[in-house]
Amino acid sequence: MSPDIPDYSPPPAKAFTLATDLDGTFLGGSEADRRALYSWIDAHRDAVELIFVTGRDLAFIEDSCAAGVMPWPDFVVGDVGTTIAKHDPQNGLMIPDGRLEAHIARLWGEGIGPLASILDAAPGITPQDGVFRYRMSYHYNPQAFDPAIKPAIEEAGFDCLISDNRFLDVLPKGVSKGPSLMRLLEWLETPRHRVLVAGDTLNDLSLFETGLKGVAVGNSEPALIERITHRANVHFASAHGAAGIWEAIRVLGFYDIAANAANTNKEALV
């Protein structure tokens, strides 16, 4: 059992699960676009499960949700897939689940070890601020970066992920957003056809590789679009950010699924 949280069973499955990236996706688009999507989610929380799948850490999510910037998620797959956490509404915190993270911790082990000094001296990358649990993250300058660093990272037993042409992440082998989301969905016993994933950069690629229905929002990174252009499970939205998610929810039928479930729940209470 996890030392972080008490043992508990999965909550009852909801009619629709939105598993979304944050920057450029759920947090993208105009304020009016974001408020329209967030208001709809809040009005249908009995039917809609919200999962953030992001490179952001838990502190950012807690601060943003507490400030009313975005609604609280039910779960977070954070730190580019290396954190899996559940919302504790009583304390307003996202609590890591050590059981779901156990394999990530084993793969990360003692961290990058001797590789750290190599990366610290490498041109074109500088460490990002923050304390990371099972990853190392860097700001990335493609003009100055030495391409030989990437195979050196992989030869040391880690994955190297470059996204938005601005960020480089060193991750445990085989760990990223998609696999960690699938681990969470398996524990939740969520039917796959009820899930929509959403993203906009290359660090969201593994979300679309799960085979789940997905939306690449209109402002997506060209490198991501190139990698997923032939995937039948992906809706390529014309609208940007939150409006792109809203577009997919309606086009792919999730709007009706959530609305019908919400109405059923209300009738059961009468």
Image (cartoon, grey):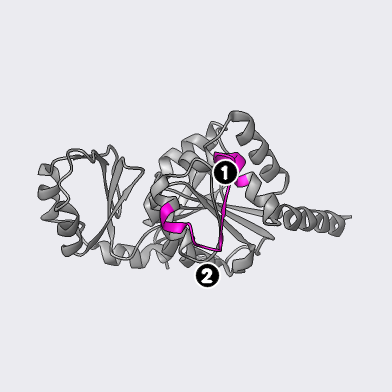
> Please, is residue 94 above or below residue 141 in the view?
below
- Point out which mark residue 195 bears: none
* CA distance for labels 1 and 2: 22 Å
Query: Residue at coordinates 61% horizontally, 57% vertically from top-left?
Result: 17
Percent x, y of residue 175: 35, 62
Percent x, y of residue 240: 55, 39
* SS under mark 2: helix
- The amino acid marked with disc number 1 is Trp
Q: Residues within 10 Å of mark 1 (few under 14, many from 20)?
A: many
Query: Residue at coordinates 62% horizontally, 69% vertically from top-left?
Result: 191
Tell me: 12 left or right of 155: right
Q: Residues within 10 Å of mark 2 (few under 14, many from 20)?
A: few
Percent x, y of residue 119: 14, 47
Query: Residue at coordinates 17% horizontally, 38% vertically from top-left?
Result: 144
Tell me: 6 left or right of 127: right
Q: What residue sits right under mark 1 in the picture?
A: 72
**Which quadrant: the N terminus?**
bottom left
Depth order, front residue of 270/186: 186
Tell me if I can see residue 148 in this picture: yes
